[in-house]
Image (tube, rainbow, N blue to C red):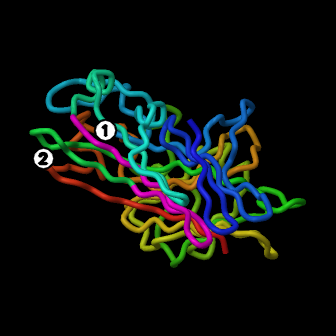
Amino acid sequence: MRIELRRGQYAAAVDTKGGELVSFRDGQGVEYIWQGSAESWTGRNPNLFPIVGNLKDGTVRINGKDCEMARHGFARRSEFAVAEQGEDYVVMELRHSPETLACYPCPFVLRICHQLLEQGFSTRYEVRNPGGEDLLFCVGAHTGINCPLDGGARFEDYRLVFDEKEELRPLIPTAQGLLAAGRFGPELEDGDTIRLDHRVFDQVDTLIFEGPRSKGVTLRRTGGGREIHMSFDGFPMIAFWTMPDASAPYICLEPWHGCAAYEDESGDFMDKPHAIRLAPGGEKRLSYAVELR
């Protein structure tokens, strides 16, 4: 089911399948969310839970049980219920079920609140632990942004600029979608800039930054034009991706709390980098926002 949101000149749509915000448009009808394509990536803005990325050998051990899950977890393929709704916001809810417990033996409540802002939207994740044991999980976003945003522009006319100067080199995945110590991508230009180039993503697949000092990043066109800023305070990782060898007109901005498995990972969920441990009755909230500038 598709739910329409509106605030001032802005409109958005949220789908109960995956609980994701699948459209955000301004008053001129410009669409900012990638609308999917069979030729490249059919996704739009999936929610990643209870894992982010690939598992080592496709399995992870949770409370002594070996569990299998597909890349990025099951939330993006699950049907959410509408818990709350207003003109400019909606709260989607997913709870554990016999189907989820078969691959992830943990009771949980996942709420995702999408809300329109004065010049953008925010997405908030709320995870509660209704069970009697600690809840282990990862959570993140995979927001596909149309790029270019202006007619006549090219993907290569844009760059990603961090809010602050960084001293990081991006992690890049192996062919199996895992991470490996010492496997890095190209350095940032001027300490804060990634110039978008399909040839780079054809080689590295994903650029993953762990522990940036910045709390946000801007997608900006050289010479001016429409741009967006994503704030991701609270997420320890941010990744950037577009389908390799597709030359598709989008870039994904992905704040993560968790990541793909490392090649030398123990295989136990509690040892996954940035996995969240939630005590019985506890709740964790994380949010990001996308705003036009």
Q: Residues within 10 Å of mark 1 (few under 14, many from 20)?
A: few
Q: Residue furthest right?
A: 152
Q: Is residue 41 left or right of residue 223?
A: left
Q: Amino acid at mark 2?
A: Pro
Task: Name the residue tied to disc 2.
Answer: 280
Residue toward you, 81 or 76: 81
Image coordinates for residue 103, horizontal then vertical, percent: 30, 24
Tell me the quarter of the image containing the C terminus.
bottom right
User: Of the residues tagged 1 and 2, which is closer to the observer?
Assistant: 2
Q: Residue furthest left?
A: 132
Q: Is residue 287 left or right of residue 16?
A: left
Task: Name the residue tied to disc 1.
Answer: 264
Task: Give how far apart the Cα atoms at labels 1 and 2 are.
Answer: 30 Å
Residue occupying the point 46% across, 73% down: 214
| Mark 1 or mark 2: whose residue is earlier in sequence | 1
Image coordinates for residue 250, horizontal then vertical, percent: 70, 50
Q: Quadrant of residue 196?
A: bottom right
- Region rendered in magenta: 107-124
> Where is 191 relative to 24, above or below?
below
> Where is 109 relative to 171, above or below?
above
Tell me the quarter of the image containing the N terminus.
top right
Q: Is residue 190 left or right of residue 158?
A: left
Residue toward you, 54 or 20: 20
Residue occupying the point 33% across, 53% down: 126
